[in-house]
Amino acid sequence: MNQLEIVNQTYRLAELILHSSLVENYNQTREQMYADTEAIDSIASFQELKERYEEVQRFGKYHPDYRDIQGQVRVAKKKLEGIPVVAAFQKAEEELDEVLYQVSRMIADAVSPTIKVLSNNPLQASGTGCGSGGCGSGGCGCHA
C-alpha cells in the first residue's frame, strides 16, 4: 500500500468517526452547553479566575493571593462541573476522546508497541519517553 492509499483510508476512517453517534452526541451537548446562559457565565468566570491563577502561579505560594485564588479556582471548577449541560458535554467529550485514543493506539501498536500515543487520560499514557501522557482537554475552552 502506498502513501496515497494510506491517506485515503485515513479519510474514510475519519468520515466513519465523524458520522458516528459519539460525534453527534458531542456536537449536541456542546451546542446545548453554549446555549445555556448559566454555563456561558460560569465558563467566562472560570476563565477569568484561571488567568488570575496563572498570574499568581508565577510567584507560587509566596504570592499573597496564592491560597485565595487557588481556592476560588477550585470552587469555580466544582460549580462549573455541577451544571448539567457542562457535565453532559464533558462526558461526551471523554467518550469521544477514548475512542480516538483507542483508534490511535491500535494503529500505533500495529506498527510497534513502543510508539507513543498521547492521551488526555494520564492513566492511559503509553509509549516511552517524557512526551507520553496527557494534556488537559477542554474543547469548550474551560479546561474543567
Image (cartoon, rainbow, N blue to C red):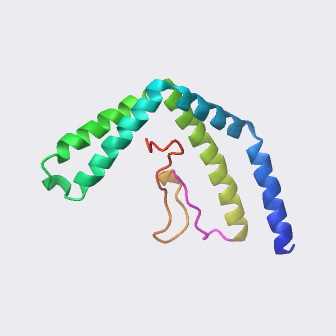
Along the line of sight, which residue is nearer the eye, 40 or 82?
Answer: 40
User: Which residues fall within the magenta stretch?
Assistant: 112-120
Q: Quadrant of residue 115?
A: bottom right
- The image position of residue 92, as x and y in percent, is 60, 36
Q: Residue at x 30, y 40 (%)?
A: 73
On screen, residue 70 versus residue 24, left or right, reads left
On screen, residue 101 versus residue 37, left or right, reads right
- The image position of residue 35, as x and y in percent, is 55, 27
Along the line of sight, which residue is nearer the eye, 93 or 59?
Answer: 59
Q: Residue at x 47, y 53 (%)?
A: 122
Q: Is residue 129 above or below residue 26?
A: below
Q: Quadrant of residue 139?
A: top right
- The image position of residue 34, as x and y in percent, is 54, 32
Q: Residue at x 55, y 55 (%)?
A: 119
**Quadrant occupied by the C terminus:** top left
On screen, residue 31 versus residue 125, left or right, reads right
